[in-house]
Amino acid sequence: MATDRTIAVFIGSIAIGLLIPLLVILSYVVWKGWRYLRPAFFTQDQALVGSSSPATVGGAKHAVIGTLEQVALAMAISIPLGMATAVFMNEVGGRLVRPVRVVVDAMSGVPSIVAGLFIFAVWILGLHQSFSGIAAAFAMSILMLPTVTRTSVEVLRLVPDGLREASLAVGGTQWRTVWNVVLPTARSGLITAVILGVARVIGETALLIMTAFGASLVNYNPLHGPQQSLPLFVYQAYSINTPSEVARAWTGALVLIAMVLFLFGAARLVGRARTGRVTR
């Protein structure tokens, strides 16, 4: 009992020690960005913003739309591939499992700037395509794919083998067992894998410089033309280093954090609701 309490107190102290810096950072971002947060920040772009414009003029509508589109495209690319790779590695098996695991582990350590350079070399220079949101989504998917795959593999390993054996015993095929038994059982964990993948890429800036390139106007088409994103908006505004642009950068950072928290909360609510539902 004494040993358990000592370890519990030690772990709790570490958790509190890690939580305090996080709260300090969040509080500072909220304090710096809240003062200039206006409804116009979500309804206007930088078309009418000049070098002497105050921080309350203009907004980041173009960056918010670009972030949502780029992350959505990256999810559409990496989630099916990541889930399929995880199912192959954990449920199917074979000689290719080890090489695939080595490739996934190697991709986990790829820096974001390398992913951006790869897409820049292949998509923009090699295929003569323009800077665009889809190029940024390709680079994001390179970083998102290994996170989704590795986390999904660990989640699928937690599904009891008895469920698979019961499904096979009543005549279910392997793919029906995976589709109707394994994946629904691990649904909440797979949603967590998606959350971790989104968290891996939504704040990256280096790859956006070489793929999306940034823009001051709204570009609804991610397939053509430069497109802005919130991390790139924050970086470009802060690099100008004028009081109004620095204020816009802090506001953009606050909005980016709020978007991440909203996506995390929505995903957790969806996963919890579906997990608790009892179906026939």
Image: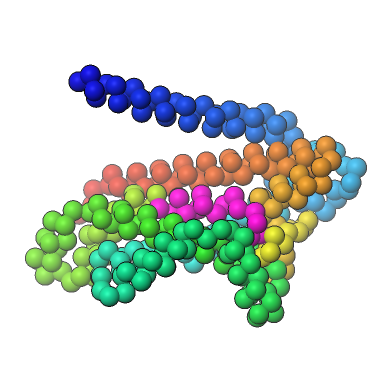
- Secondary structure mostly seen in magenta is helix
Between 254 and 57, the one nearer to me in the picture? 254
- Whether 239 is drawn above or below 33: the answer is below
Between 19 and 54, the one nearer to me in the picture? 19
Q: In this image, 102 relative to 205: left or right?
A: left
Q: Position of residue 83 (x, y in %)?
A: 37, 63
Residue farthest to the left, as pictured: 169
Residue at (21, 65) in percent of width and height: 177
Residue at (17, 61) in percent of width and height: 164
Q: Quarter-wise, where is residue 28 in the image?
A: top right
Per the rendered image, the range of residues in magenta is 193-208
Q: Is residue 246 magenta?
A: no
Q: In this image, 209 relative to 264: left or right?
A: right
Residue at (52, 26) in percent of width and height: 20
Between 61 and 175, the one nearer to me in the picture? 175
Q: In this image, 242 relative to 79: left or right?
A: right
Q: Is residue 199 magenta?
A: yes
Between 24 and 218, the one nearer to me in the picture? 24
Q: Is residue 145 visible?
A: no
- Quarter holding the N terminus is top left
- Quarter holding the C terminus is bottom left
Q: Position of residue 203 (x, y in %)?
A: 59, 50
- Whether 17 is drawn above or below 43: the answer is above
Q: Quarter-wise, where is residue 40 in the image?
A: top right
Q: Is residue 175 visible?
A: yes
Q: Position of residue 34 (x, y in %)?
A: 69, 32
